[in-house]
Image (cartoon, grey):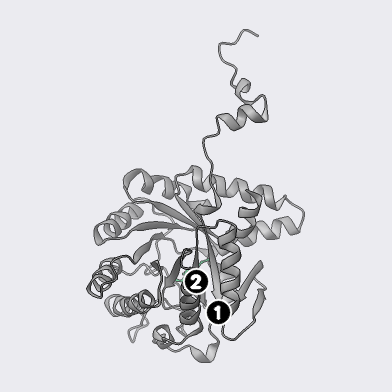
Amino acid sequence: MELQRRPRRNRFSPARRELIRETRFSPSQLIAPLFIVPGEKRKDPLSSLPGVFAFSPDMAVIECEELLNLGIGGVDLFPILSAHEKDPRGSKALDRFSPLAKATEEIKKNLPELTLMVDLALDPYTNHGHDGLLDPRGFVLNDETVEKLTEMAILYAELGVDYVAPSDMMDGRVGAIRRALDQQGHLNVGILAYTAKYASALYGPFRNTLDSAVKNGDKKGYHMDFCNAKEALLEAYLDEQEGADLLLVKPALPYLDIIYRIQEKTPLPVGAYHVSGEYAMLKAAAEKGYLVYEKALLETLTAIFRAGASFCLTYAAKEAAKLL
Ligand code: PBG
């Protein structure tokens, strides 16, 4: 054949392919979500998230040290409470002596160079499972919830986090948190805004782990409708205006178009949350022998970065760091 162009020439050898590779990422762009439980010396396996553990504060420090040595970019902490600790107002969220508070303090004290984030939302703490306070009809109140999140942000800033990560999608929370942090002198504590968090079925394993599934209804009155893309640009615009430092799209792989669109429009770094259901699907398929986990994982994460993500939260952070 007489061909002007033979694109396969650039794919001829591993070295040629490596030379022209467009997307690369390193462990420093991965953030590991960590679940915190009370007590000591605990590293509990989680039945809905194979290969992921819940740590008591002392063990979380040891895990973080390992992650730091692997070059991981940061950790994001989530609490696991038992049913009797939850109430309608999520009162434990402001407990200065909770296991989450203790883990935050200990990790920052022992590993100050590790970027430390904490998720800000009420759903781990409320017995109804919603991310906010409810009015008598069961509607999630916006402004009252924002007030709570603001108090949480101040508490965790005092305990030493680098970023607070509001994951609830209430209106105006980024601005309110920024103002409160500044007033208290926490000028270097950043906000990782869950900008486009969709009302997704892919949070199932996370909610099983925290026993945080909503008891009545769903989260569609605040998390975004997965039929919408332009709305994500409005959320990005508002978070940017309100002072967010980092934007996040969640889930990740089914929402590559959203990552791509937002990062085209904003000067801020955009990250992605490869959520529990996405991770569990890979694990389950691999367990059945349908695919090779390591290859599918690296392909998935590469796709997320190729779409324009600057960083990625994933339960596979440690595994990926070892593979890279
Ligand atoms: C809390 C929160 C959730 C997740 C992260 N932060 C659960 C939810 O919104 O119901 C899900 C993360 C995952 O599935 O990995 N609002």
Q: Is residue 310 left or right of residue 57?
A: left
Residue hosting label 2: 77
**Amino acid type, residue under disc 1 in the picture:** Pro
14 vs 93, nearest the viewer: 14
Front: mark 1 or 2 = 1
Q: Residue 294: x, y in percent?
A: 68, 51
Residue hosting label 1: 57
Q: Residue 139: x, y in percent?
A: 35, 79
309 vs 65, nearest the viewer: 65
- CA gap, disc 1 and disc 2: 11 Å
Q: Residue 209: x, y in percent?
A: 59, 75
Numbered badge on residue 128: none
Q: Is residue 217 left or right of residue 324?
A: left
Q: Residues within 10 Å of mark 1 (few under 14, many from 20)?
A: many
Secondary structure, mark 2, is strand
**227 up-or-down from 40: above or below:** above
Residue 280, located in which quarter of the rendered image?
Answer: bottom right
54 vs 90, nearest the viewer: 54
Residue 207, visible in the rendered structure: no
Residue at point 61%, 64% (across, down): 66
Q: Is residue 141 left or right of residue 310?
A: left
